[in-house]
Image (cartoon, rainbow, N blue to C red):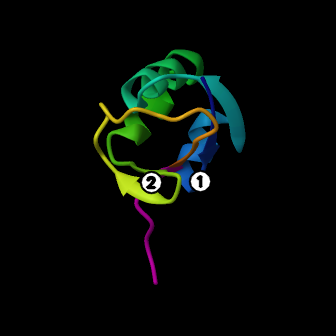
Amino acid sequence: MPVTVRYFAGARAAAGVETETRDAGTLSELVGQIVETHGERLEKVLTACSFLVDGTQTRDRSLRLRPGAVVDVLPPFAGG
């Protein structure tokens, strides 16, 4: 089931792309795929990231993803 992944700030820099499409059934499966593709640098960033799935924040990696979901990868932001 295709989902869109959008990377922001440090996650974008670590992934080397702004957005991509993946086939994943859960957030955990998605995270495994993107770490496998983009490597250790992104994996380190992901330890501090939160995720928005269709606009709702979650850290629950067992969350089922619906086809067409949009997953935003958000590292902590500094400033105000």
Q: Quadrant of the N terminus?
A: top right
Instruction: Tell me which label, 1 or 2, sits earlier in the chain.
Output: 1
Give the amino acid at mark 1.
Answer: Phe
Residue 9 in the magenta stretch? The answer is no
Q: Main secondary structure of the magenta part?
A: loop
Depth check, front residue: 24 or 49: 24
Q: Which mark is residue 8?
A: 1
Q: In the rendered structure, are the residues bearing label 1 and label 2 in contact, judged by CB atoms less than 8 Å apart? A: yes
Q: Residue at x 51, y 15 (%)?
A: 36
Q: Which mark is residue 75?
A: 2
| Stretch in magenta | 73-80
**x, y (%) of residue 74?**
48, 54
The CA distance from mark 1 to mark 2 is 7 Å
Q: Residue at x 44, y 54 (%)?
A: 75
Neighbour tally class for label 2: few under 14, some 14-19, many 20 plus, Cα within 10 Å:
some
Depth check, front residue: 6 or 17: 6
**x, y (%) of residue 55?**
51, 59
Q: Residue at x 37, y 26 (%)?
A: 28
**x, y (%) of residue 6?**
63, 46
